[in-house]
Image (cartoon, rainbow, N blue to C red):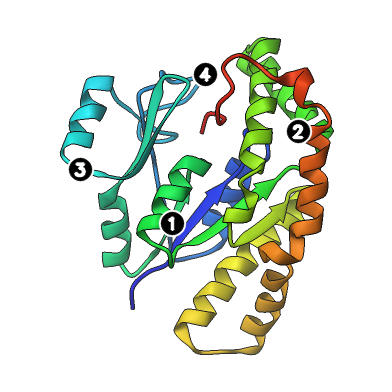
Amino acid sequence: MSGILFIISAPSGSGKTTLTNELLNLVPGLEFSISYTTRPPRGSEQSAREYFFVSKEEFEQMLARDEFLEHARVFGHYYGTAKHFLADAFALGKDLVLDIDVQGAAQVKQKMPEAVSIFILPPSREVLEFRLRNRSQSEHVDDRTVRRRLDGARKEIENYSNYDYILVNDRLEQSIDQLKAVVSSERAKRSQTPSAVATEESDKAQRCLRDNVRSRAEQILRSFEEHGGENASPASAPNER
């Protein structure tokens, strides 16, 4: 049986990296695709761990050879997922997890509509701003960058309705549990081997389906729109991955 492709997207600061890492640690049979980027490493980042850091020329050569499943250019830097990660994971009988932005997710969904897409939301704009400002101290970024990320978050959240599942990350343990449930439920659907565990996980996953979270997602989006003018920046664009 072919593997499942899971797409996870979220605004910067929503906890996507933490949730994805927990998912990979707790759920067997998952492979993670490390993206390629032309942006320089930040802090303690290392090539082949957070990203494959390559030159613009190398990235464009890969583009010319049609080696990317998806790619995007954000704030002047390229980001992309190499196709071979998908083939390698499926050949091993594993599912693949992609951590990509809304641009990349749209490209992948167009090519592979059977992929399972998951969008992680912060509980509110206020909570996201608090998280971003705390993180900015360790990253040594300025206030303009924080405001740009908040504006980018609003633009990304506007795309939530393009995703299959929505997780509101207000309590970490609950969000991890929900993410695991989505993976287990999708696997159970495709394996056609229902069980009591699969049914319980399916119930949890159902509560995260887009239409079942729409009212909460709209409430969160409104919290960003109410501050839209305050954080707008000249370089309005999706957030960094």
- Crowdedness near tag 2: few (<14), some (14–19) or many (≥20) residues, C-alpha within 10 Å: many
Q: How many marks?
A: 4
Residue identified by numbered label 3: 66
Q: SS class of the residue under badge 1?
A: helix
Per the image, the residue denoted by label 2 is 128
Residue 54 percent location from the top left of the image: 29, 25
Q: Is residue 208 visible?
A: no
Asked if marks 4 and 2 touch (Cβ < 8 Å), the reply is no
Residue carrying label 4 = 43
Which residue is located at x 61 percent, y 39 percent? 156
- Residue at 64% x, 50% y is 160
Residue type at mark 3: give it. Asp
Q: Position of residue 198 (x, y in %)?
A: 62, 82
Mark closer to the observer (1, 2):
1
Point 46% across, 49% down: residue: 106
Q: CA distance from mark 4 to mark 2?
A: 21 Å
Asked whether 212 or 140 is in front, the reply is: 212
Query: Which residue type does callout 2 highlight?
Result: Leu
Identify the amino acid type marked 1. Lys
Find residue 69 and report its horizontal and vertical position in percent.
31, 48
Cα distance, mark 1 to mark 4? 32 Å
Earlier sequence position, callout 4 versus callout 2: 4
* 1 vs 4, front mark: 1
Quarter of the image for the N terminus: give it.
bottom left
Where 16 falls versus 75 (above or below)? below
Q: Which residue is mark 1?
A: 109
Task: Mark 1 and mark 2 in contact? Answer it, CB < 8 Å.
Answer: no
Query: Mark 1–mark 3 contact, CB under 8 Å?
Result: no
